[in-house]
Image (spheres, rainbow, N blue to C red):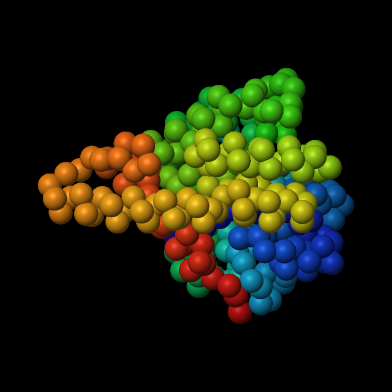
Amino acid sequence: MTVLRSLLFAPGNHPRRVEKAFTLGADAVILDLEDACAVAEKEATRPVVVEALSRPRPCLGYVRINALGTEFAYGDLQAVVQAGVDGIILPKVERPDDLRTADWLVSQLERERGLAAGSIDIIPILESGAGFAALDAIVRSGTRVRRLAFGAGDFTLDMGLTWTRDELELLHHRSAIVLASRAAGLEPPIDTVWVSLKDQDGFRDSAMRARMLGFQGKLCIHPDQVAVTNAAFTPTEAEATKARRVIDAFAEAEAKGSSSFQIDGQFVDYPILYQAQRVLAALAAIEARPTARV
């Protein structure tokens, strides 16, 4: 079971910020060649991010390349499919062929460079109306992709939406990406960034909404967001305690020939049992996640 609660962006062309990003407790750091990297510096930054990801670090390391429709994408892929890079963030995906193209190119580069087939993860970001219109085809593209991410900044711009503090305008689209991912057998998706950096309460609410809607984690753009995100997507001690009670009580009930009963006034049957098992599995995966890469 993969654990990706917090994925922190860092501009690939700022060595100090890159170095600091790996010390902040994120489950993954994303070194950015796209929005956070000026056009004049994109090509020169490619070897910089590869070198940064070749060093020891305490979490997964991804690179966000430029969109496939740009002049930089092919060069980005040529440069960053290397040992030490855990995966690629693929922005502005709008059709299944975007994923098939990226998957094919990465596969050839893995083979050419002696990397294990499928070892480079790909996380596509859906951030346009066209992407959501093709959502069902995208999740069934037949590629190595295991999870999607949602990018509300470009999405609200593309759709002419106003991105509000309570994010009600995003509810349908968040639910759609969770549902499509589940129906296609993918992992739960990764939720969008939060851009109001001074509004920590708003960010915390956004993260909790995403968890309740079925996301597994959230993209982060500021160091202060990492701990909040990890807390939001980690089962609490109270949730873990209740899950253990449910599992123990269910085993006792089944031994007596029953599969439904009450705990503290709540009806318990198999779906409640499975949810309790999921809570403990998530905790176990969090505790077992790699603590260092050498």
**Residue 190 located left or right of residue 274:** right
Closer to us: 119 or 255: 255
Closer to us: 202 or 42: 202
Q: Residue at x 60, y 75 (%)?
A: 292
| Whether residue 183 is situated above or below residue 187 in the rendered picture | above
Name the spot of residue 51 as percent of width and height, x first. Answer: 72, 72
| Whether residue 256 is situated above or below residue 69 in the rendered picture | below
| Whether residue 73 is situated above or below residue 283 in the rendered picture | above
Q: Residue at x 49, y 36 (%)?
A: 178
**Residue 214 located left or right of residue 249:** right
Q: Residue at x 32, y 36 (%)?
A: 267
Which of the 4 image quadrants contains residue 62? bottom right
Q: Which quarter of the rendering shows the N terminus? A: bottom left
Q: Residue at x 29, y 56 (%)?
A: 248
Closer to us: 142 or 16: 16
Which of the 4 image quadrants contains residue 79? bottom right
Q: Is residue 216 visible?
A: yes
Q: Which quarter of the rendering shows the C terminus? A: bottom right
Name the spot of residue 202 as percent of width and height, x first. Answer: 73, 37
Closer to us: 251 or 132: 251
